[in-house]
Image: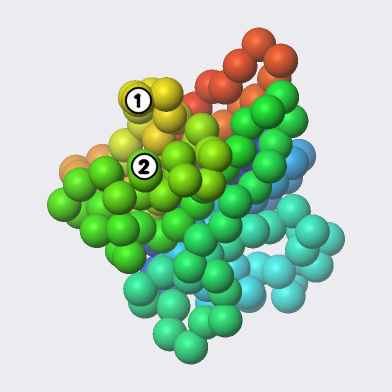
Amino acid sequence: MRIIVMSDTHGNYRALQSIITRNADADWFIHLGDGERDLDRFILANPEFTEKVIHVKGNCDENSLSPDFFVLPLPFGHRIFAAHGHRYFVRDSLLRIKQAAIDNECDIVLYGHTHVRYNKYEDGLYIMNPGSASAPYDSTKPSFGHIDISEAGVVTNIADV
């Protein structure tokens, strides 16, 4: 199973479109907020992706009806906890979002908001911030993440847009 993760597109429709179309065979596409209009525009133009897209609202997604977080059960006993991150104060610490994942019995944590890549396994959790697909704050190129899940385990990686 392959999951593509993106965040913080902030109006860069071309970046979002590139990420999804280059990875069209993925099982899931997760957008972690601050780009809901970009995602809506893509889905309207490409309705065949509707069933494969999940998203949460970010702090810049005004008037959004999307959830603040979601939990996605996956094969082989894995579960994803995904949130934009602003409500968990991820700029200060990952403690709150890690605890939310644990409370929801998840072993994969996805968040955005900081525009800074983060990809580690710690405290029994796979933790990923794919960075920003449009405006990174860490002197790297715009990026997105991918997660591969099989019987052998979980592999997470971050790639340039």
**Which residue is the site of mark 1?**
123
Q: Nearer the viewer, residue 99 or 55?
A: 99
Question: Residue 30 location in percent, x, y?
Answer: 58, 52
Q: Position of residue 41 (x, y in %)?
A: 63, 75
Q: Tell me the kind of residue under disc 2.
A: Lys
Residue in the foreground of this view, choosing between 70 and 61: 70
**Residues tagged 1 and 2 counted as in contact (Cβ below 8 A):** yes
Name the residue at 26% across, 44% down.
Answer: 95
Q: Which residue is farthest front?
A: 103
Q: Secondary structure at mark 1?
A: loop
Q: Quadrant of residue 151?
A: top right
Position of residue 80 relative to residue 10, above or below, is above
**Quadrant housing residue 128:** top left
Q: Position of residue 72 (x, y in %)?
A: 64, 47
Residue found farthest to the bottom: 63
Label 2 sits on a secondary structure element that is helix
| Residue beneath the point at 63% across and 74% down | 40
Total residue callouts: 2
**Nearer to me, 123 or 157:** 123
**Residue position marked by numbered label 2 in the rendering:** 98
Q: CA distance from mark 1 to mark 2?
A: 9 Å
Which residue is rendered at x = 54% and y = 39% of the image? 105
Question: Is 93 above or below relative to 124?
Answer: below
Compared across the picture, whether 84 is left or right of 71 comes to left
Asked if residue 51 can be seen in this view, the reply is yes
